Image (cartoon, rainbow, N blue to C red):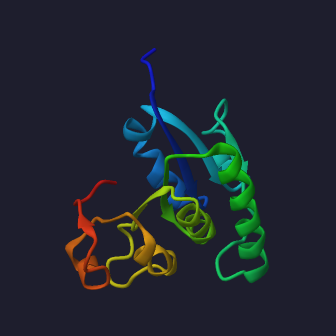
Amino acid sequence: MTKKSKIKICLVCSAGGHFYQVLQLKEWWSKYEYFWITSNRVDSKGKLEGGRVYHGYFPENRNLMNALKNLFLAIQILKKERPDIIFSTGAGIAPPFYLIGKLLGIKLIFLETASHIGMPTLSGKLVYHFCDTFLIQHKFSKKFYPNAEMRGALI
């Protein structure tokens, strides 16, 4: 087993496609200490056994009450865990964690999903202006996120 870097990463994402996109980047994030914030659904449960996992409040998209609950959850978890980086592909679980992460001085990296090249995601629009690094996977996304870093198809 290789020694992990001292960097700690918080992986925040909704279930389904957002979750599987983060899983596809395992070669990158597994080199570091990490923990997850995601839903308590069957598609994520089996894939995260043995890791540190916190469950957010869902449904989170356009649900003000759960957004507020996730905001307070973000305060609690981020103060406890003190990650160096928050990474997400979305969706609605990300903005509360990014807001608190920004206030705590945590580096914020967001990867806009490749499935939304014709229009920006709501999560992307909400976190774009306060991310340290905003990544896009298709050149068409540059019109919505002019300062984003184009990385090509990462996923």
Quarter occupied by the C terminus: bottom left
Left/right placement of residue 98 relative to residue 143 reads right
Residue 147, given in percent of the width and then of the height, sits at: 26, 75
Q: Residue at x 51, y 60 (%)?
A: 18
Residue 95, given in percent of the width and then of the height, sits at: 57, 71
Left/right placement of residue 107 relative to residue 94 reads left
Res 96 visible: yes
Q: Residue at x 37, y 39 (%)?
A: 28
Image quarter of residue 39: bottom right
Given residues 133 and 64, the one toward you in this image is 133
57 lies above or below 118: above
State how many labels appear.
Answer: 0
Left/right placement of residue 14 relative to residue 128 reads right
Q: Residue at x 52, y 66 (%)?
A: 90
122 lies above or below 34: below
41 lies above or below 27: below
Q: Residue at x 41, y 75 (%)?
A: 128
Res 58 visible: no
Given residues 66 and 5, the one toward you in this image is 5
Residue 7, given in percent of the width and then of the height, sits at: 46, 37
Given residues 86 and 120, the one toward you in this image is 86
Residue 15, given in percent of the width and then of the height, sits at: 61, 58
Give the residue at the far top of this rendering.
1
